[in-house]
């Protein structure tokens, strides 16, 4: 009978150990995130930090190219206008002096 009691105590100890390990595993699985949660968290962090995406960068590049082209057109107009006014000023001076 003592042999049965000792076996019973050993089995109960092992059962308690297994139950403790199961509880620990349950806690670990509750705290771990799956792939979808990671994706959602990453998107949330990106939107909170205002990190620029490839699409945003491409849009910004297009706007900068358009602004640069507009600046080039204005610069050409300014150079042509300045050239014409310089020629007019020199020709007016030449008429006065001759």
Image (cartoon, grey):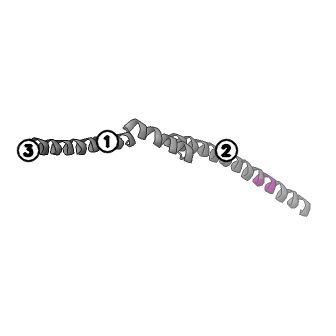
3D distance between C-alphas at marks 3 and 2: 97 Å
Residue 68 shown left or right of residue 3 in the figure: right
Q: Earlier in the sequence, mark 3 or mark 2?
A: 3
* Total number of numbered discs in the rendering: 3
Residue 92 pos. (x, y %): 87, 57
With 12 as the anchor, is 39 left or right in this view? Answer: right
Q: Residue furthest front?
A: 1
- Residue position marked by numbered label 1 in the rendering: 23
Q: Which element type, helix, strand or loop, lies under badge 1? A: helix
Seen in the picture, residue 61 relative to 94 is either above or below; the reply is above
Q: Quadrant of residue 89?
A: bottom right
Q: Nearer the viewer, mark 3 or mark 2?
A: 3
Q: In x, y percent, where is residue 42?
A: 46, 43
Q: Which mark is first along the chain, 1 or 3?
A: 3
Q: Main secondary structure of the magenta part?
A: helix
Circle 3 is placed at which residue position?
A: 3
Q: Position of residue 53 (x, y in %)?
A: 51, 43
Q: Which residues are magenta?
A: 82-87
Q: Which mark is residue 70?
A: 2
Distance of label 3 from label 1 (alpha carbons): 30 Å
Residue at x-position 51% and y-position 39%: 55
The tag on residue 80 is: none
């Amino acid at each position: 009978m003592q042999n049965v009691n000792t076996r019973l105590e050993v089995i109960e100890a092992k059962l308690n150990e297994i139950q403790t390990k199961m509880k620990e595993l349950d806690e670990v699985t509750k705290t771990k995130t799956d792939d979808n949660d990671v994706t959602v968290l990453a998107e949330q962090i990106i939107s909170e930090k205002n990190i620029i995406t490839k699409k945003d960068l491409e849009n910004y590049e297009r706007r900068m190219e358009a602004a640069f082209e507009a600046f080039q057109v204005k610069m050409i107009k300014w150079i042509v206008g300045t050239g014409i006014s310089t020629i007019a000023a020199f020709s007016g001076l030449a008429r006065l002096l001759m």
